[in-house]
Amino acid sequence: MTSRKNLRQKLHHIIFDYDTIPAKAFDLVLIVAILLSVTAVMLDTVSSIRIGYGELLYGLEWFFTILFTVEYLIRIYASDSRARYIFSFYGIIDLLAILPTYFSIFVPGTQYLLVIRFFRVLRIFRLLKLVKFVQEAEFVKASLIASSRKIVFFLFFVLVTVSIIGALMYLIEGEESGFTSIPKGVYWAIVTITTVGYGDIYPQTVLGRTLASLLMIVGYSIIAVPTGIVSAEMAAMHEKIEAGNKKEVSCCESTKHDKDACFCKICGRPLG
Amino acid sequence: MTSRKNLRQKLHHIIFDYDTIPAKAFDLVLIVAILLSVTAVMLDTVSSIRIGYGELLYGLEWFFTILFTVEYLIRIYASDSRARYIFSFYGIIDLLAILPTYFSIFVPGTQYLLVIRFFRVLRIFRLLKLVKFVQEAEFVKASLIASSRKIVFFLFFVLVTVSIIGALMYLIEGEESGFTSIPKGVYWAIVTITTVGYGDIYPQTVLGRTLASLLMIVGYSIIAVPTGIVSAEMAAMHEKIEAGNKKEVSCCESTKHDKDACFCKICGRPLG
Amino acid sequence: MTSRKNLRQKLHHIIFDYDTIPAKAFDLVLIVAILLSVTAVMLDTVSSIRIGYGELLYGLEWFFTILFTVEYLIRIYASDSRARYIFSFYGIIDLLAILPTYFSIFVPGTQYLLVIRFFRVLRIFRLLKLVKFVQEAEFVKASLIASSRKIVFFLFFVLVTVSIIGALMYLIEGEESGFTSIPKGVYWAIVTITTVGYGDIYPQTVLGRTLASLLMIVGYSIIAVPTGIVSAEMAAMHEKIEAGNKKEVSCCESTKHDKDACFCKICGRPLG
Amino acid sequence: MTSRKNLRQKLHHIIFDYDTIPAKAFDLVLIVAILLSVTAVMLDTVSSIRIGYGELLYGLEWFFTILFTVEYLIRIYASDSRARYIFSFYGIIDLLAILPTYFSIFVPGTQYLLVIRFFRVLRIFRLLKLVKFVQEAEFVKASLIASSRKIVFFLFFVLVTVSIIGALMYLIEGEESGFTSIPKGVYWAIVTITTVGYGDIYPQTVLGRTLASLLMIVGYSIIAVPTGIVSAEMAAMHEKIEAGNKKEVSCCESTKHDKDACFCKICGRPLG
C-alpha cells in the first residue's frame, strides 16, 4: 500500500514537477518525442517520401501514439486531482494528441490532425524554467483581452463591409470575372481587404477596379485600427508596470506622511 | 382611444426598449430573422443551390421583406417622434433593408443589395446590453475622428504618388505587360502600394521592376504613418480617460486636504 | 506707370492671397482646371476613349497647357520677388506642370508626365483655409523627419537582407522557377518581404519554400519596426503638445515662486 | 625595426581610424570597391549581360577578391590585437567576403554568395561619422532585444497555428487544389497569414475558402501584436531617454534647492 503510494508520488514528481533532474530529463525526452512524431506525420503526406518510407512512418506513428497513450494514463494515475487534470487545458490537449490515430482506423486521413500535438510543446516553456517567458505571455494575453472588445467591434464592421462590397462586386463583375456568387465575392473582398491578394479572382471592369481600389485603400488605412488598439493597450500596461516599479523613489523620505495617507501629498507618489 | 394609446405604448415598449423580457425576445427574433434573410440572399447566388432551392429562397426573400416592411411600419407607428425615427441612422437602414426587393421587380438583380440588412444587426449590441461595447465603439470612433484630418492628408499624398507612378509605369512597361492605360497603371500602383499584389498585372522590364521595388518599399514603410497616427491618438485618449477616471474617484471627498498638499494623500489625484 | 503697378498689385491679390472673394474664386477655378486637365491626360491613354475622343482630348491638353503657361507667366509678373517664386516648391511644380506638353512635340509620350499637375492641387488646402490641415501636415512631417534616420537604418538592413536572400534563391531555385538572375531574385525578395506577393515568380523546391517562409515571417515581424518608430515618435510629439497645453494648471497658485523659478518647486509644473 | 613599427602604425591609422584625411579616403575607396564588386557579381547572373561581358566580369570578380584578400591580410598585420580582429564581427565578415570566389574554383556557383560583401558597407556609417546613426541603431536594437521574448512567444503561436491550419487544408482541399502534402499546406498557411498571397496555391472548395478567410482575418488582426509590442517598447525607451536627458541637464547644479523642494525650480527635474 505504501509502496504503491510511493510509486505514485515518484511518478508525480517526475511528470508534474520541473526542478529535479529526472523531471527535466522527462520533459526533454517528451518534447523531442513530440517534435519527432509531428515531423513523421507531416513527412508521411509527402508522396515521394511515403513511397520509400511509408511503412516506417506508419510504424513510428503508432509507436508514438502508444507511447503518448501510456504517458496520458500515467499522468491520470499520478495526478493529485484526476478530474482536474483531465479537464484542464493540458489534459484536453494530451487527449486530443492521441485520439486521431485511433480514429484513423475507422476514418482514414484523420491521423493528420495529430499536428495538434504541437500544442504539447508549450511545456517547453516550463522545461526552460522561463518564468520570464510566462510573464511575457501574460503581458501579451492581458493586452489582447483588454483590447478584445474593441477588436470584436472592429471585426464586425469589417465583416459588414466585405459582405456589402462582395455583393456589389457580384453585381458589377458577374461570372465572367470569376465572381460566380455573393459568397465568392465576400471571399474575394476578404482576400483584398486583408491585403493577401492571391489573384485567383480579380476585377476586370473599370467600375470593379475602382471599387476594388477603394476597398484596398480602406483596408490599408484601417489596418491601423487593431494595431493602434493593441499598441495603446500595451503602452498603458507598460506604464502601469513602470508605476509599480517606481514605488522605490525616495524623494520625500524626510516628509512625515500622515498615517492614513496612501499617496505622498507633496509629490503624489503612491506610498508602499 | 385609450386602448389605442395603450397598444401603441405596449408596442413602443417591445420595440424600442431593451430591458424587459418581451423586448429582449423581440430583438432576438429580429436578429435571427435578419441573419437568415441575408444568408438566403447570399445562397441564392450560388448556382448549384439556386437550381435546387431557387423557389424556396425566392419565397423566403419575399417573406422576410414583407415581415420587415410590417415591422418598419409598426416602428413608425409606435415611435414617439415619427420624423425623428424615419430620418435617424437606424430608420434609414431599416428602410434601405426592404427597398431592394421591391426594386427587383423592375430591375432584376438589385435584390442582392439586401445584404445591407447586415447593418441592422448592430442592434445586437443593444440586445446584449453591452453598454461597454458602445463605449468601445465610441473610443474607436473618437480616435478615428481625431486622426481623420491627418489620414486624409496622408491619403492625398498616396493618391498623388500612385497617379505619378501609374503614369510612369504606363510609359515604361507599355501594353505588352498589361499596362494598357494610365488608369490601369494607377490601379496597379494601388494594388502594389497597399501590398495586395494580385499578380494580374506586373512589371516585366528591368526599369519597371526597379520602380515597382521602390514603390513596394515606400508602401511598406509608410504603412507606419496611418498606424502611428491612430496609435498615438488612441494612447492620448487612453491617458485622458485615465485622468478623467481619477477625477471621478470620490474616496477623498471627506478628507480635508492639508493646505500645502498638491496631491490628495489618499488617492494621489492632483488637487486643483 | 501707376496703373501698371495697380494692375500688378491687383493680380497679386487675386493670385497669391486667399481671403478675398476674387482670390477664392481664382483658386477654385484653378483647381477645377487642374483636375479636368489631369483627367483628360489619363483618359487619353484608354484606347477605347482615344479612338472616339482623341482629337478633343488633344485639344483640351493644349488648351489647359496654354492656360497654365499664361497663368505661370502672370504669376512671375505679379510676384513680389520673382526669383523667389520661380525657385520655390510651388514655382518649380508650376513649371513642371506645363513642360511635358511642349516636350511631347519632340518626344511623343512625355505628355503623360502631366499627371505631375496633381501636385498643384496641394493649393486646395490653402483654398479651404484649412490652417488645421497645415498643422496636421506639419505634425506628420515632423514625426517622419524625427524618425527618418532610424528608418534609413532599417531600410539599409532590409536591402542587405533581400540582396543575400535573392542571391541564395538564385542558387537554390535556378532558372526553371523564374529566378533567372540575382537581380530578379532580389526583386522577388522585395515582393515577398513587403508582403506584396504578385505570384509571377515563386519558389518551387522544398529548400526554396523553406527559405521563402522564413523571409515572409521576418517581413511580417519587422513591419513592426518602422511602425513602432513612427508611433513612438508621434506619441512623444503628442505629449510635448499636451505638456505645452498644460501650462495653465493652477494647482500651486498660492505658493509664491522664487523670481528665478522656471518650474514650480512643489509640483514640478513649468511656470509661464 | 622602428621603420617596420612605423609602417604598421601608419597602416593602422589609415585602416582603423576615421578622422584623418587618408583614413577617410581609404574608407571611401573601399566602399566604392565593395559596391562595384557586388554589382559585378549581380550583373554576371543576367544572361544577356554575361554573354557580352562575361570575361570582363569574371576578371573584375578576381580583381576585387585579390584586392580584398590583400586588404584583409594588411588588416590582420596592422591590427593591435590580431585574434580580436579576426574573431570580431567585422573580421568574420571581411573573411566571408573573399572566401566564395576561392570556393568557386571547386564548386561553381558559390561565387554568388559574394553578395555578403554588402555587409562590409556597414562601415559607411563610420565613414560619415554618423555617431547619431549609431545611436539610432542602438535604439532599434535595444527595442528589439527588449521585445524579443514577447515576439518569440508570438511566433511560436503563429507556427502552431499555421501547422494545424496547413494540416486541415491538406485534408479539406487535397491534391487537386495543389495542397499535395502537409508541409505544402503549412507553406500556404504562412503565405496567407503573412498576407503575402502569391496565388500559386489557393483554396477551391467552400470549406477551404471559409477556413482561409478565417486565417486571413486572424493574420490581419494579429499583425497588431508584434507591432504593438515594438511600439510600446519604443515608447517606453523614448521616455527613459527623455528622463535620462533631463537628469543630465546641469542648469541647476549651482542653484541651492530649498529643503521642501521635490522638483528643481529651474529645470523641473525631480530631486532625488
Image: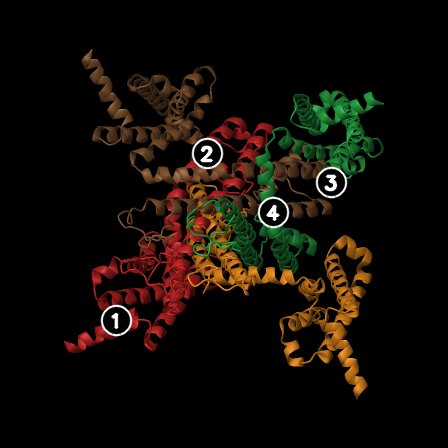
Chain colours: A red, B brown, C green, D orange
Q: Chain of mark 3?
A: B
- Judged from the image, the secondary structure of the residue bearing numbered disc 3 is helix
> Residue D138 at x, y = what percent?
58, 63
Location of mark 3 (residue): B172
Foreground disc of the pair 2, 1: 2
Q: Which mark is residue A12?
A: 1
Identify whether B161 is placed above or below B27: below
Foreground disc of the pair 4, 2: 4
The extreme top residue here reads: B1
Q: Which mark is residue C142?
A: 4
* Camera-side residue of C158 and D65: C158
Query: Amino acid under label 1?
Result: His
* N-term-proximal mark, 2 vs 1: 1
Query: Amino acid under label 2?
Result: Thr
Foreground disc of the pair 3, 2: 2
Q: Chain of mark 2?
A: A
Query: Amino acid under label 4?
Result: Ala
